[in-house]
């Protein structure tokens, strides 16, 4: 076995979660990039960024910075990738949101890549599935959605 094969075998696999939403891609994009929307599905964290490639991101609760990151890929209404971390010495978590038009709405796929400390399958589901469900509520409801931190 080569060294590359050994690395691949021990490297954690990214996790993917998907849902269907009866909304258009522009509404989903707005929910992903508007600080007034992100707190409703990201456990109360408001995401502040210019959403340009290599731009910084700051996720914060009221007055407190909780996570920082950087934008990796921006394809409006189609794809948004960034990484976040709790501190400079913490491993990054890479998130990629894919938005694909489907009959009657869009399919949203979230890819999560935790490079150094991956959650097991159940832990990952406990974290990311409620967030995806809250995003569904956010993009399909007119009034503000209930945030998942409550």
Image: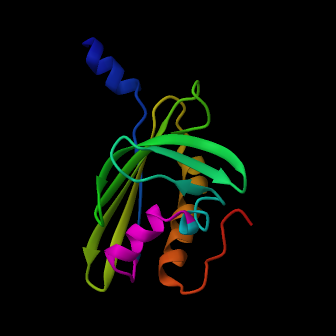
Q: Is residue 84 magenta?
A: no
Q: Position of residue 36 (x, y in %)?
A: 57, 68
Name the chief secondary structure element in magenta: helix
Q: Residue at x 39, y 83 (%)?
A: 22
Mark count: 0
Nearer-the-camera pick, 52 or 8: 52
Q: Is residue 14 visible?
A: yes
Nearer-the-camera pick, 11 or 24: 24
Nearer-the-camera pick, 69 or 52: 52
Q: Is residue 19 visible?
A: no
Q: Position of residue 101 (x, y in %)?
A: 26, 74
27 lies above or below 73: below
Of the 4 image quadrants, the one containing the C terminus is: bottom right
32 lies above or below 12: below
Q: Is residue 28 magenta?
A: yes
Q: Residue at x 34, y 71 (%)?
A: 107
């Amino acid at each position: 076995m080569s060294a590359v094969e050994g690395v691949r075998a021990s490297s954690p696999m990214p996790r993917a979660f998907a849902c269907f939403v009866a909304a258009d891609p522009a509404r989903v994009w707005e929910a992903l990039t508007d600080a007034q929307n992100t707190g409703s599905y990201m456990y109360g964290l408001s995401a502040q960024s210019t959403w340009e490639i290599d731009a910084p991101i700051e996720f914060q609760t009221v007055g407190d910075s909780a996570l920082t990151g950087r934008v990796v890929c921006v394809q409006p209404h189609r794809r948004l990738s960034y990484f976040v971390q709790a501190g400079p010495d913490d491993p990054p978590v890479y998130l990629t949101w894919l938005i694909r038009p489907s009959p009657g709405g869009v399919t949203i796929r979230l890819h999560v890549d935790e490079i150094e400390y991956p959650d097991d399958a159940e832990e990952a589901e406990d974290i990311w599935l409620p967030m995806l469900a809250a995003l569904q509520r956010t993009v399909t409801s007119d009034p503000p959605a209930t945030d998942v931190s409550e």
